Image (cartoon, helix red, strand yellow):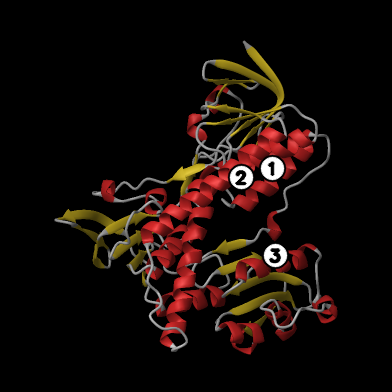
Amino acid sequence: MNMKYDLLVIGGGPGGYSAAAAAAKAGLSVCLFEKDRIGGTCLHQGCIPTKYLLDRAAALEKIRTMTKAGLLRNAGEFSFRAVMQEKQVVIDRLCTGLETMLQSNKVKIVRGEARFRDNKTLICNGETYTADNMIIAAGSSPIKLGFRGSEFCLDSTEALSLTKVPRRMCIIGGGVIGLELGSAYMAYGSSVHIVELQDRLLANELPEAADYLVRKLSARGMNLHTSSTVKAVEKVGNEFIVHTSAGKIAADVVVSAIGRRANSGVLGIENTDIQSDSRGCIAVNAQMQTTVDSIYAIGDIVGGYMLAHAAYAEADVAVANIAGSVGKSDQHIMPRCIYTIPPFAAVGLTRTGAEAKGYSVTVGRADYRANGMAAAEGEDGCVFAILDQKSRKCLGFSCIGAGAPEMINAASIALEREYTTDHWHRLIVAHPSLSESLREAVLAAK
């Protein structure tokens, strides 16, 4: 039997479920295919479980600091098992909420793996589905390593499901996933080593901001090995020996966090006219259309920013175009957040990116030590503002420290509205607040 809908959506992660809900609210009949649970990697193996662990870890760090200062006594004991159990409670609650939301909007949810038969048809569980339009939101999976002993490495999903805190952890990959996992487990008591191929961490970010974060992570005890490659992992008794170009690292747990690959290989796109690159990322235009006009692709499957909020934004664009409006993806105001301890967030251009576009750049800096709220909360950090020296227009921001992922939203608005120093002069910012540092950084630019 052939089932016909206005829109078929492959994948129930952030991009998929938000696109399905938005299209249904616009009056379209929608069918969503998901082989696992609604919420995707973000909810079940990424954003939410990682942030849950980091939130509790940051609380422990705060308690330890206050205990060391004599403000608390006999504080800081915790049950990792209880933390992990409560993490799953939070995930299950959010998952149930998403399914209820989709059902209330009359989105049909089909449990199974959908594949293309041709440009117009999907097959799932032996049934045939057609629609005027389709959205691919099939996400990504961890990249597998290929060196000797790679079978001993956990991926990021497995690292988020440990039942006890390892005494020693070695993480291969110093990107967002590796640094977040390292920050969390270090706070719970692990000795953490990060092995990174590049010669610097966060190489695409503002160097002053990236270096500031690296110093903070190192000061907390994170062992960072840049310009290092992993040659092999060897199991010796109850421990693992990670052989790197810089030497050997002994660990109880080894985690692979070298990135993610688009899940396009299981979709049957070879049966369509959809084009993809060598990494499996599906080619799209600014309207999120693939090389088949009626098929759109969003989220990790298209590469670019593999972030939940990028998928949300791309879903909005795709649905707008399907519903008859004109939508276009604009990624220059895409926030980039790393939930380390302390957290990092950035948006817009770096100095190098701005200069490449022909801007004459000036950078302003505001330190937390001059901020009343930071002093009251015992926090350290700084904010950098990148401006065009001629027009005084804001081009980018980088924040390191408590509240950075929240502050970056205001910075995104400033970029979208093309704020200049004149706008920031007139802006009234609540005092005391960490957000005052955004204004101070802009006004500090020469």
Q: Quadrant of residue 352?
A: bottom right
Mark 3 crowdedness (10 Å alpha carbons): few <14, some 14-19, many ≥20: some
Instruction: Using a 10 Å C-alpha cutoff, classify the residue at mark 1 as few (fewer than 14 neighbours), some (14 to 19) or many (20 or more).
Output: many
State which quadrant residue 127 falls in. top right
Residue beneath label 3, please? Answer: 409
Q: Quadrant of residue 33?
A: top right
Q: In the image as oriented, which residue stretches furthest toward the front?
A: 73
Which sits earlier in the primary sequence, circle 3 or circle 1? Answer: 1
Give the Cα distance between marks 2 and 3. 19 Å
Q: Which residue is mark 1?
A: 315
Mark 1: amino acid: Ala
**Outermost residue to the left:** 237
Tell me if label 1 and label 2 are in contact, CB under 8 Å: yes
Residue drawn at x 60%, y 50% as measured from the top left: 308
Q: Vertical placement of 350 versus 389: above or below?
A: above
Q: Which residue was labeled with disc 2? A: 14
Residue in the picture at 41% in, 80% down: 219
> Quick one: SS at disc 1?
helix
| Relative image position of residue 445 (x, y in whole percent) | 71, 83
Q: Give SS at disc 3.
A: helix
Q: Specify the amino acid type for callout 3.
A: Asn
Judged by depth in the image, the label closer to the viewer, 1 or 2, is 2
Q: Residue at x 82, y 77 (%)?
A: 427
